[in-house]
Image (cartoon, grey):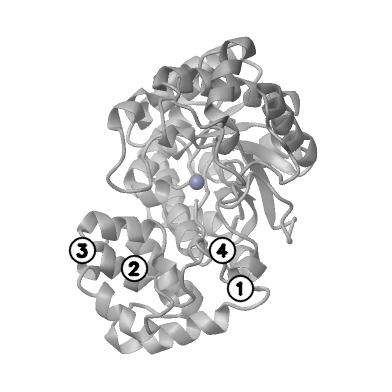
Amino acid sequence: MEKIKDLIEKKVFKTPFIDTHEHLIDESERLDCIEPIIPCDDWALLLNLYFSFDLISAGISKEQIDSLFSKQVNPINKWGILKEYWPYLKNTTSGIVFRNTIKILYGIDEISEDNIIELQNRYEQTRKKGFYKYIIQDIANIKHCHINSPIIACKKSESPDLLLQDIALNGLIQVAVKPYSVPENVKINSLSDWHSLIDWWFSEYNQIAKGVKIGNAYFRRLDFERVEANEVEKIFIRKTSLQIVSSEEEKKLQDHLFWYCVDKASEYGLPVKMHTGQWAMNNVMNMQWVKDNPSDCASLCKQAPNTKFVFSHLCYPHYEEMLSLAKSYSNAYIDMCWSWSINPLAAKDFLKKFILTVPNNKIFTFGGDDKIVENVIGHAFVARKGIAQALTELVTENWITISDALDLVDNLMYKNAEKIFE
Ligand SMILES: [Zn+2]
């Protein structure tokens, strides 16, 4: 047993990932501390995304959280804010990701009153030109990341071999407020202008894009139906001239634009990545919509057999349904991004079941889904630990042999992603 575990762990920890989903900004933007993405520039920034959502869940006040991420508060005093909540959060996976990040990157075993100054010093020493490559490739052993920009639908990164891009379609489907998706010189007076705008994003970026990303599951069900342009032209005009549109009309318009975008992606051979399941932010999640995601996804797969759909986050907590979906539909792929830090035991369980249930060319096992590059280290560590555990258990429970398990590693960690996205 020990030998099996060691062999598998060794292989998993030395195999590189292709990281299929991050929200990283460029290194120079991080060093320039662009707001609001980077609210402060000290060690507390490492707590800024998923850990902070867990802090809110634990009951931290708005005032405390604002201070934790404020540029005006002395970084050394920030432990005073965190320490009340630390015992409640240190064993959640967002806490475990943070602990592994500071351990691997800074050599700090455990955050405490006594080492905040050291933590701050190590943060400052590490965060300098070249640190993205150092963290992503040298420390986390990741070949490259797919980026869903938190700022713009798509742009060429300053390190195009490290940060590859997806085209984010949310704003093009929901007709978002400028300037998220509308270049300054473009005038939008009709639905066909909007179509041209979508066409422009695709023609401009299809060469560098690895896929497209659709995050509209945060705002609605995924029950997109095909609606003709002439049925929504007037709704579009009313919406863009800021008149009231009913929720039924809004749905129709989004349905139409969703399929316009998805068909365009398929025309360019780009896989369509979709958020499913758990919502990141607090106190708004519609669990009934989330529950409907798997059957809505099945309907999308059926409606567009030539589109490759990549469903993210295991649709947590409805991951059994996603196994069934991926088993049935040949155009359904699963991306385990973020799932290791939502619930690593569910992710491990999912991966074991996936290997025994679904052809294993249809899964991608890692994406940190993070904005703060340092955390990719802790997250990748947790994912590797989970993957190694899943494979070890499949061997010790006599489902597969040790050589089967070792053979699976390359496909799970990078070869599947290479095939579908390259
Ligand atoms: Zn994401």
**Residue 372: x and y, percent?**
51, 63
* Residue designated by label 4: 140
Foreground: disc 2 or disc 3: 2
Image position of 290 with respect to 51: above or below: above
What residue is pinned by disc 2?
A: 66
User: Does any portion of residue 153 appear in the rendered image?
Assistant: yes
Q: Distance between the residues labelled 4 and 3?
A: 27 Å
Residue depicted at 61% across the width and 73% down the height: 31
Mark 4 or mark 3: which comes first in sequence? Answer: 3
Type of residue at label 1? Answer: Leu
Residue at image location 74% in from the left, 52% down from the top: 156
Residue in view at x 39 percent, y 36 percent: 350
At label 4, counting other C-alpha atoms closer than 10 Å, the crowd grade (few under 14, some 14-19, many 20 or more) is many
Q: Quick one: SS at disc 1?
A: helix
Q: In this view, does 354 lie above or below 224?
A: below
State which quadrant residue 50 falls in: bottom left
Of the image marks 2 and 1, the number of the one nearer the N terminus = 1
Q: What amino acid is labelled 2 in the image?
A: Asp
Q: Nearer the viewer, residue 169 or 387?
A: 169
Q: Which residue is identified by label 3?
A: 88
Residue designated by label 1: 31
Q: Which of marks 2 and 3 is nearer the N terminus?
A: 2
Tell me if mark 1 has few (under 14), some (14-19) or many (20+) residues whose alpha carbon lies within 10 angstroms of its own. some
